[in-house]
Image (spheres, rainbow, N blue to C red):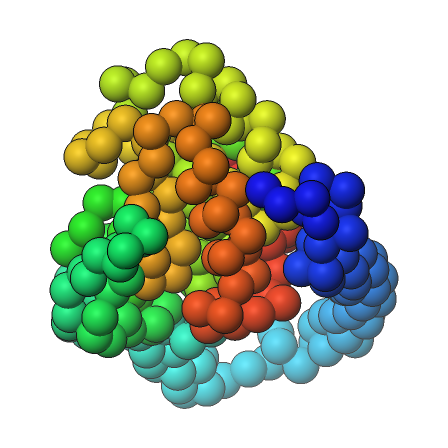
Amino acid sequence: MDSAHQTGTDPRKARIEEMRRAEHARQRRNRVVVIAASAVAAAGLVAGGAVLLNTRSGDDKSTSASAGATRSSGMGGVKSGTDGAKNGGRTGSGHFVTGADGVRTWKGTLTRNHVAGPVKYPMEPPVGGDHNPVWQNCDGEVYTKPVRNENAVHALEHGAVWVTYNGKASEADVAALAAKVRRTPYTLMSPVADQKDPIMMSAWAHQRTVTGAGDPNVDKFFAAFVQGAQTPEPGAACTGGLGQ
């Protein structure tokens, strides 16, 4: 990493820290809104209780049919049918091209639908495609157990870098990488047993192998892809999602 990164004056790091503070403020505001809304909803339920008791059976059937239609079409942008919870999602089409710097870039399309079911990705770890509506928390999170690809891909969509390792990685490298991830917003780390190399780094549409925690390409990958230009949803939250 260059001297700007070491001294903490890197503009990207400053911008990420600013987004982190804004996200924490947004979450506090949301908690206040949820509490207020819950109070209003409770009052409404009490006031409307007598009306609900007199609801006709025909209306009940209509409500049930409407609820069934809502479940079949999904919530919050979740797709149904062949691309949704029943049969999983898609990834798009394309292939990796390896650059002179060793970074593999996906050339083609990567779909971005929210799906409730599993997705079969053509690479491991995946670098994009349809994904779960809930992102994996990625505010410097280190997971000691595997996470679901579908949640991790959503974190990549938010501009996170995902550090992964298998059983061939040394304990020293895993510990050093974990310490680096904990210091870096918009990153996460987890084991992936089936990946082809001991240590890999992934961002949306980009991936590379590194030789260990001391490989200079670790810092280069972080500098290029943590909230980098490849991010489909720059500034989106890396907290408030799924933990472990």
Q: Considering the image in quadrants, where does the N terminus appear?
A: top right
- Location of residue 79 in the rendering, given as x and y in whole percent from the top left corner: 31, 74
Q: Quadrant of the rendered structure where residue 94 is?
A: bottom left
Residue 97 drawn above or below residue 2: below
Q: Is 123 situated left or right of 35 in this image? A: left
**Residue at the image position 63 percent from the left and 67 percent from the top:** 235
Where, by quadrant of the figure, is residue 105 drawn?
bottom left
Instruction: Locate residue 88 relative to residue 76 in the image: left or right.
Output: left
Residue at 53% x, 22% y is 176
Relative to 179, residue 38 above or below: below
196 above or below 145?
below
User: 65 or 59: which is nearer to us?
Assistant: 65
Q: From this viewpoint, is residue 136 visible?
A: no
Kindly identify the residue that appears in the image at 22 percent across and 57 percent down: 98
Residue 220, horizontal then vertical, whole percent: 49, 47
- Depth check: give the residue in front, 169 or 220: 220
Compared with 25, 71 (above or below) is: below
Which of the two residues, 113 or 56, is positioned nearer the viewer here? 113
Residue 45 lies in quadrant: bottom right
